[in-house]
Image (spheres, rainbow, N blue to C red):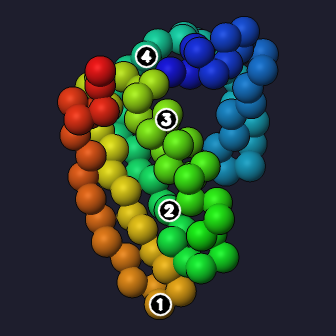
């Protein structure tokens, strides 16, 4: 997915720090390796009009991801109540 988001990314485009000290980047590879990701979605009243765009963006991210990726969604609202739902990649693939 990174390759499609940053198609021309090169090692010189990144800086790596450890304990505030810049480290030399020894190897830079572009690979689509499986990741686990979480989406935190605001369901408060102020987001009501934006929800269709938020939903579309979340679905686009999951659909464009590696088939071996894992994803979960945490929703929260004005009452700070949250729920967590595990997403099955198969459900989003055509």
> Which residue is depicted at the point 73% across and 26% down?
14
> Which residue is depicted at the point 54% across and 10% down?
29
In the figure, is residue 26 to the left or right of 15? Answer: left
In the figure, is residue 60 to the left or right of 18? Answer: left
How far from the left and from the top, in percent, is residue 60? 49, 33
Is 35 situated above or below 66? below
Residue receiving disc 3: 61
Query: SS class of the residue under badge 2?
Result: strand
Sequence order check, earlier mark of 1 and 2: 2
Residue receiving disc 2: 41
Query: SS class of the residue under badge 4?
Result: loop
How far from the left and from the top, in percent, is residue 37? 40, 44
Sequence order check, earlier mark of 4 and 1: 4
Query: SS class of the residue under badge 1?
Result: loop
Q: CA distance from mark 1 to mark 3?
A: 27 Å
Residue receiving disc 1: 79
> Which residue is depicted at the point 29% across and 21% down?
94
How far from the left and from the top, in percent, is residue 61? 49, 35
Q: Residues within 10 Å of mark 2 (few under 14, many from 20)?
A: some
Residue receiving disc 4: 32
């Amino acid at each position: 997915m990174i390759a499609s988001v940053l198609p021309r990314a090169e090692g010189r485009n990144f800086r790596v720090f450890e304990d505030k000290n810049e480290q030399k980047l020894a190897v830079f590879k572009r690979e689509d390796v499986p990741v686990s990701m979480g989406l935190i979605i605001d369901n408060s009243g102020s987001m009501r009009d934006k929800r269709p765009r938020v939903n579309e963006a979340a679905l686009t991210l999951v659909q464009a991801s590696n088939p071996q990726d894992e994803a979960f969604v945490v929703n929260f609202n004005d009452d700070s109540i949250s729920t967590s739902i595990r997403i099955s990649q198969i459900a989003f693939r055509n």
